[in-house]
Image: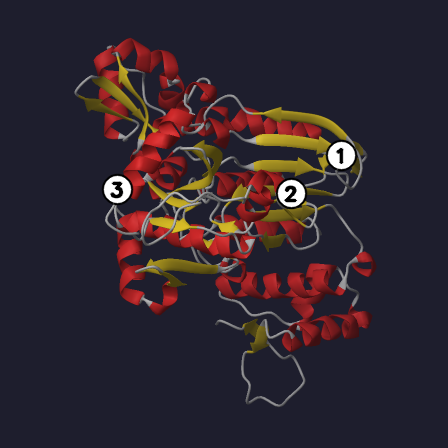
Amino acid sequence: MMKVEELNNLVKELISQPREAEWIEFKHNFHSLEEVGERLSALSNGACLQNQHYGFLIFGIEDESHQIIGTDFRPSRYKKGNEESENWIAQRLSPRVDFMIYEFDFDGKSLTLFQIDAASTQPVDFYHEAYIRIGSITRKLKDFPEKERKIWKKFGQSIFEKDIAKTGLTSDDVVKLLDTSGYFEMIELPYPTSQAGVLERFESENLIKRSSNGWTITNLGAILFAKDIKNFPTVSRKAVRVVVYDGKNKVHTKKDITGVKGYAVGFEQMLQYINDQLPTSEVITQALRKIAKAYPEIALRELIANALIHQDFAATGIGPFVEIFDDRIEISNPGQPLISPLRFIDEYQSRNEFLASLMRRLRICEEKGSGIDKVIYYAETGLLPAPDFRVKQTHTTVVLFSHQKLNDMSKADKIRACYQHCCLKYVSNETMTNESLRERFQIEDQNAAIASRIIKETLTEGLIKPLDPENRSRKYPKYVPNWA
């Protein structure tokens, strides 16, 4: 937070500019929060394009003369419906980008200043539309493809995993802050006989790097191997939070904990804690009593690992989130996916390739593209409803449901299961049939019409198609995903 003196100096610096820029806008009157949101999107994108750390929107300054005229716009007193203006704007910017609002006096005149971070991983949009300033006018970014291309090109210049988490460290500091022994155990290598050997190995993995004032721990090193993630401000908000609710909603919370260790060294302990919170059932097989968990552990492992790997680290104030209800478990990560959820089973694209690569080599997750296949496979073999992949404005959530009878499933549940079953068959070099779907749902042969109806509904949704559209025979038809 800037003090009044710092704000006054900033205003003097901004009004000394010869004219408004792609990252600076002066306004006198407030019209609507929608207009503010569009301006913030444009200024964030413009700041990125002009290599500025921030964009600035100031109310109370005449745009041509830069004369201080004051404003009566006070965002802290303005609401949109029953929602505070700052929160209303923040919820509609994507990806979530930090911005600050300052209300202060300059030479006896009231000013309101919005300071927004420059776009860092993708163009910032407002209400699903990205904007840019062209001269003194705010325009849609898509109408200026060359500027959009330049912005996207800049994102390749900064990789979160390689950025600095903590610098100016001694060799002893590195070993105190990072769980070096945990790394060598996971990679199945003997622990080096010298500290220099430890640091050399960590440097080769991009976990640390040499700098002019000692050693630097990268975000990759901190997020994976921190002994206490709170020691690293750049990643401390990315710790995994696990909440256990009493019932099927969020009214009553039983437990709420946040992880302390880095993802790699704390993964097994976190997974064990989550498994311990899940409901169990007693199964009797061959006169032996066996306790069965509600969800396959391998499916949980893959979904949690995916949430860590595919999160958008540029989204501020939020990290991976696991919520456990009586009838389901929801696993969320910040940011929207880079590919459609309908293609999760056969496609792969990650924002964080260094993180993903190392987590695969540490055997925390599967090879590229096979994790979701396993999740769907074990959901089917466990006779669970199909996992539901939900994309929200600020995050992506996967819902794994506990066992339900077919009659208790909704139409959407059945269609989703049919589509996923068809995809799983296709990537296994097989095709879906009425028979295979009956087996998936445990439908008796005499009730084949039930499976036929589910297939018809999935066809109507356009999610699957006949393998051979020219085959008019209704006997033993085969189906493939719509993208096959």
57 and 47: which is toward the camera: 57
Q: Amino acid at mark 2?
A: Glu
Question: Height in image: 226 above or below 347?
Answer: above
Q: Earlier in the sequence, mark 2 or mark 1?
A: 1
Q: Quick check: 127 left or right of 439?
A: left
**Residue located beneath label 3 in the image:** 16
Q: Nearer the viewer, mark 2 or mark 1?
A: 2
Look at the numbered disc 2 and give the secondary structure of its residue.
strand
User: Residue 280, labelled with which disc?
Assistant: 1
Residue 41 horizontal/vertical position (percent): 43, 53
45 and 55: which is toward the camera: 55
Question: Height in image: 196 above or below 36?
Answer: above
Q: Earlier in the sequence, mark 3 or mark 2?
A: 3
Residue 174 horizontal/vertical position (percent): 31, 15
**Residue located beneath label 2 in the image:** 330
Q: Nearer the viewer, mark 3 or mark 2?
A: 3
